[in-house]
Image: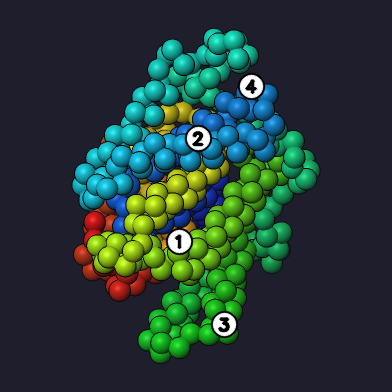
């Protein structure tokens, strides 16, 4: 039983990791591209890498953290403008080929040995520029971020009241886990019942919010997480990361419910019809590309705060992970990107740790278990696409694409 709880504890830890939050923000931007506008952007990792490089290089060169973030966002705007100007008239596969090629160009430029160290007069000679294939270590650019923390020093346990407060027995943990599952099932049935009734009110939303909060609190009661308050991979970076996820979700909610958001849906479903109504389709697509790219750059900054800026770690596989998370959660939904990202990363760790624990090394080594986790997640994705193409929170009416 202890092994099962250890596996589940690792899964919960991954679900709230800064990297998970960073990818969730990037998926929110990708949802704006693909889910709401119908832009088949396969280069979201390029925006993430530019944002990470812009922030890290600026901090290394002595730029204050706030302005370093603005520089990273500015690079994303510049990239989106240069990328979109000649390519937004393309559709479907052609746009996908161009965007993934652009992202790969950025990755390979970041790996160049010529840009490993700063050797120019306008920067501090000998300091890291892109770091080449080794990247920029977190210790060189995260100090200003940690210095603004008000969390203090030492370690802290999220959910101080947990199963250990009631004796720490296995029975308490099992009971807590059963309560968590009951809350999740209750939330799902309540949401489906209200959708079927086609009469949703603020009361319904409040009930769902309360059920979600109770579910998370129960999960942390069973699996309390103890980490440092302000260190590189501590609570400070997690608090900032998930706050940015919440803010990004609210921003997208306001955008897609505005007249501009309805215009995005119109372009996604029938671009020619919107053009015949006198709408500047190209301008709206460019706006969507830039805004979604800004979310990607912000996600890239969050992603590297607890690790390092390394070109290959933000390669094309991150874009594929982002699309997997988006399809699992539900494209063109508000909370689907966040839910899909958490499920994707949690499921991967759950499968990997279970394989390492219960499958002998003679059959499946640790490295093979990592690959096996991706295979299983891929199969799950195929089943979702076949049997529920709209994803967990998606709507079939939002599947009308004209790409």
Q: Vertically, is 388 above or below 110?
A: below
**What residue is at 45 percent from the left and 80 percent from the top?**
191
Estimate the x, y position of residue 287 in percent, counting from the top left: 44, 51
Locate residue 218, reporting x and y percent.
59, 68
Q: How far apart are labels 3 and 4 at the CA level?
A: 49 Å
Residue at the disc numbered 1 = 339
The residue under the point 58% across, 34% down is 71
The alpha-carbon separation of the residues under discs 4 and 1 comes to 37 Å
Q: Position of residue 40 (x, y in %)?
A: 29, 50
Q: Of 46 and 364, which appears nearest the observer?
A: 46
Q: Residues within 10 Å of mark 4 (few under 14, many from 20)?
A: some
Q: Are marks 1 and 3 in contact (CB under 8 Å)?
A: no
Q: Nearer the viewer, residue 21 or 160?
A: 21
Label 2 and label 4: CA atoms lie apart by 16 Å
Whole-number angstrom distance, CA of label 2 to CA of label 3: 39 Å
Disc 4 target residue: 61
Query: Can you see residue 217?
Result: yes
Instruction: Determine the CA span between mark 1 and mark 3.
Output: 21 Å
The earlier-in-sequence mark between 2 and 1 is 2
Mark 2 residue element:
helix
> Which of the marked residues, 4 or 1, is nearer the chain's N terminus?
4
Please tell me whether mark 1 sits on a helix, a strand or a loop: helix
Would you name the residue on which mark 2 appears?
A: 75
> Residue at image x 42%, y 40%?
81
**Label 4 element class:** loop
Question: For the residue carrying disc 1, how many other residues have a C-alpha within 10 Å: few (<14), some (14-19), or many (20+)?
Answer: some
Q: Quadrant of residue 97?
A: top left
Question: Which residue matches tag 3?
Answer: 202
Indicate left or right for 363 with 113 as reference.
left
């Amino acid at each position: 039983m202890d092994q099962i709880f250890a596996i589940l504890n690792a899964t919960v830890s991954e679900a709230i990791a800064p990297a998970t939050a960073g990818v969730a923000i990037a998926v929110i931007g990708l949802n704006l591209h693909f889910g709401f506008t119908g832009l088949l952007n396969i280069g979201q990792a390029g925006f993430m890498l530019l944002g990470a490089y812009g922030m890290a290089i600026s901090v290394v060169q002595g730029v204050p953290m706030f302005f370093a973030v603005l520089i990273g966002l500015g690079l994303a705007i510049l990239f989106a403008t240069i990328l979109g100007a000649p390519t937004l008239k393309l559709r479907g596969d052609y746009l996908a080929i161009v965007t993934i090629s652009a992202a790969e160009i950025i990755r390979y430029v970041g790996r160049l040995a010529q840009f490993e160290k700063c050797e120019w007069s306008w920067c501090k000679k000998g300091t890291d520029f892109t770091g080449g294939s080794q990247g920029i270590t977190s210790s060189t650019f995260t100090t200003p971020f940690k210095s603004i923390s008000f969390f203090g020093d030492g370690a802290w346990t999220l959910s101080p009241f947990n199963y250990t407060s009631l004796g720490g027995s296995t029975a308490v943990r099992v009971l807590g886990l059963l309560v968590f599952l009951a809350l999740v099932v209750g939330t799902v049935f309540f949401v489906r019942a209200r959708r079927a009734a086609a009469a949703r009110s603020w009361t319904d939303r409040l009930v769902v919010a309360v059920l979600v909060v109770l579910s998370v609190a129960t999960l942390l009661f069973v699996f309390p997480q103890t980490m440092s308050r302000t260190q590189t991979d501590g609570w400070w970076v997690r608090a900032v990361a998930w706050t940015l996820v919440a803010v990004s979700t609210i921003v997208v909610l306001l955008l897609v419910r505005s007249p501009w958001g309805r215009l995005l849906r119109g372009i996604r479903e029938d671009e020619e019809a919107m053009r015949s109504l006198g709408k500047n389709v190209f301008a709206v697509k460019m706006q969507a590309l830039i805004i979604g790219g800004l979310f990607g750059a912000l996600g890239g900054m969050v992603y590297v705060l607890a690790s390092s800026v390394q070109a290959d770690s933000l390669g094309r596989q991150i874009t594929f992970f982002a699309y997997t998370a988006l399809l699992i959660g539900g494209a063109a939904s508000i909370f689907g990107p966040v839910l899909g990202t958490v499920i994707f990363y949690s499921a991967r760790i759950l499968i990997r740790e279970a394989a390492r624990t219960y499958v002998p090394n003679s059959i499946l080594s640790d490295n093979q278990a990592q690959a096996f986790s991706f295979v299983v997640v891929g199969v799950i994705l195929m089943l979702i696409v076949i049997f529920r193409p709209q994803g967990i929170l998606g709507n079939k009416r939002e599947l009308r694409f004209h790409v």
